[in-house]
Image (cartoon, rainbow, N blue to C red):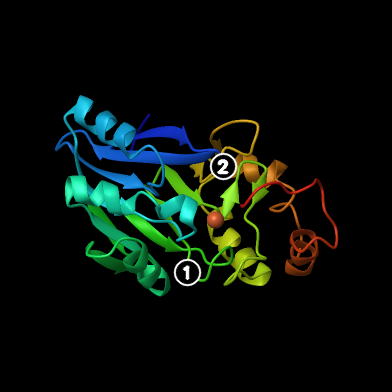
Amino acid sequence: MALDGLQIIQIEVGLLQNFNELIADPATGECAVVDPAYEVDRLLKLARDRGWTIRTVLVTHTHHDHIDGVAELCAATSAVVRVGAREADAVRAAAPGVEVRPVSDGERVPIGGESIEALSTPGHTVDGTSYFTGGAIITGDTLFVGGVGRTDFPGGDASTLWRSLQKIAALPEETRVYPGHDYGTTPTSTVGWERTTNPYLRCATEEAFVALRTGKRSPRPTRGPR
Ligand SMILES: [Fe+2]
């Protein structure tokens, strides 16, 4: 799918139904990989088959199912890892010797001649980050198709997640949503679709959202690490 000059390829990997993306500037062949944790060989082959060079790893957050492949992928490519500052040490611990450069809210990360904007979206974890191309947003475990991330892991906070979700919900309705897991009815959706159908985004107030997310009122059973 071509968006704003960037091409995005989504694949599903691992037993937790994680999504990974390759985000490329086809004009230069430079690309970024999101959250490598499983099947690094497959990610490398996808890039190689297209003549793309992986220069960057974009980490949405540092749960193991999003970073376990960083060391292997960076050893093969010398890619630089971008991650929220307060989660940078978790990447350094999981992938010693890898170059880690923290991103800040609103920072534009170059991909070839294009760029992607880091949006700070904590709440599922202490310093989660989403990445916005202008036409699509990589949401990690902040927003799923029809759901949102859990807030009961260390560093999670439902009120913080609510504020992060408001940032995403304020993007143009046609913005395509690429979540961190295949937990919904479709692999991707749009901001407009989530605003109208996602029970968490339909909450009228922060209080209602916190009650829903923390299990005081649940629309469906939760499953797996989200
Ligand atoms: Fe997670």
Residue 118 pos. (x, y %): 37, 60
Residue 115 pos. (x, y %): 26, 51
Looking at the rendering, the quadrant in which ligand 1 lies is bottom right
Residue beneath disc 1: 127
Inspect the image, locate mark 1, and give the three-letter code of the amino acid beneath it: Asp
Q: Residue at x 28, y 29 (%)?
A: 46
Residue 12 pos. (x, y %): 47, 34
Characterize the local packing of mark 1: few (<14), some (14-19) or many (20 or more) Cα atoms within 10 angstroms.
Answer: many
Q: Give the secondary structure at mark 2.
A: loop
> Which mark is in front, 2 or 1?
2
From this viewpoint, is residue 115 visible? no
Q: Give the secondary structure at mark 1.
A: loop
Q: Residue at x 62, y 55 (%)?
A: 149
Residue 124 pos. (x, y %): 58, 62
Task: Check the image and report above or below for 156 versus 15.
Answer: below
| Ligand 1 lies under 8 Å from the Cβ of mark 1 | no
Viewer-side residue, 13 vs 194: 13
The Cα atoms of the two marked residues, 2 and 1, are separated by: 22 Å
- Occupied quadrant, residue 39: top left
| Picture disc at residue 16 | 2
Residue 163 placement, left or right of 176: right
Viewer-side residue, 107 vs 77: 77
Quadrant of image for the N terminus: top left
Give the mark nearest the N terminus, 2 or 1.
Answer: 2
Task: Check the image and report above or below for 32 versus 186.
Answer: below
From this viewpoint, is residue 101 visible? yes
